[in-house]
Amino acid sequence: MPMRKYWLFKSEPSTFSLEDLKKRPGSTEHWDGVRNFQARNTLRDEVKEGDLVLFYHSSIPEPAVVGIAEVVRGGYPDWTACDPRSEHFDPRSTEAKPIWYMVDVRYVKSFPRSVTLAELKTIPELADMVLLRKSRLSIQPVREKQWQSILHHGEVDA
DNA sequence: GCCAACGTTGGC
DNA sequence: GCCAACGTTGGC
């Protein structure tokens, strides 16, 4: 069985929050609208069913990792790119030749204690985390040690 | 609201 | 293929 991987997905909670995910039918949702090529490549090629995701709230007074989601479907074409009414519409993308990809995720849990960006920056073993080095990337890998460290700080039971 | 960092576009 | 101009992200 292939090893499960870890990721961090960013979202502005005013657009879509962890609580929003929890409330969806089946607590699942399409992670669509990603319009950055590096993040697209990750979604298309690397994010697989069963992988786990740190849910990060950005663009708020205290940006923070707030919980965990699970990937329930790996990368497949993001059809919102083909919908002229979608705010993520991209006329270059077609059904035959999709440019953009999405995955489906399911709510797993909220951290008993959110781990803020300010706190993440104080944790030595997270010094080379992508979030702290290339903060704009919205879909990014998390190493197992980093994952464990963040869960520990979020007071998530092992 | 500002602005640094970064990604994308398009002229050459 | 280079690079200037421009647009976006996201912390502060």
Image (cartoon, coloured by chain):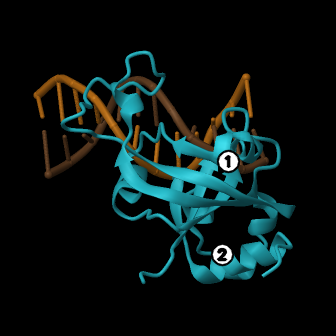
Chain colours: A cyan, B orange, C brown
Expressed as whole percent of the image width and height from the top left, the position of residue A27 reads 67, 47
- Few, some or many C-alpha atoms within 10 Å of disc 1 (few <14, some 14-19, many ≥20)? some
- In the image, taking residue A90 as reference, residue A151 lies left or right, namely right
Q: Is residue A138 visible?
A: no
Q: Measuring 38% from the left and 22% from the top, which residue is drawn there?
A: A83
- Few, some or many C-alpha atoms within 10 Å of disc 2 (few <14, some 14-19, many ≥20)? some
The quarter of the image holding the C terminus of chain A is: bottom right
Q: Which mark is residue A27?
A: 1
Q: Tell me the element at label 1.
A: helix
Q: Measuring 48% from the left and 40% from the top, which residue is drawn there?
A: A32
Q: Is residue A151 visible?
A: yes
Q: Which mark is residue A147?
A: 2
Q: Measuring 73% from the left and 79% from the top, which residue is drawn there?
A: A149
Expressed as whole percent of the image width and height from the top left, the position of residue A63 reads 76, 50
Task: In this rendered view, identify the residue nearer to me: B2 or A24.
Answer: A24
- In the image, taking residue A158 as reference, residue A138 lies left or right, namely left
Q: Measuring 74% from the left and 73% from the top, which residue is drawn there?
A: A150
Against A10, residue B11 (above or below) is: above
Against A60, residue A73 (above or below) is: below
Q: Tell me the element at label 2.
A: helix
Q: Of the two numbered discs 1 and 2 on the same chain, state the one appearing first in sequence.
A: 1
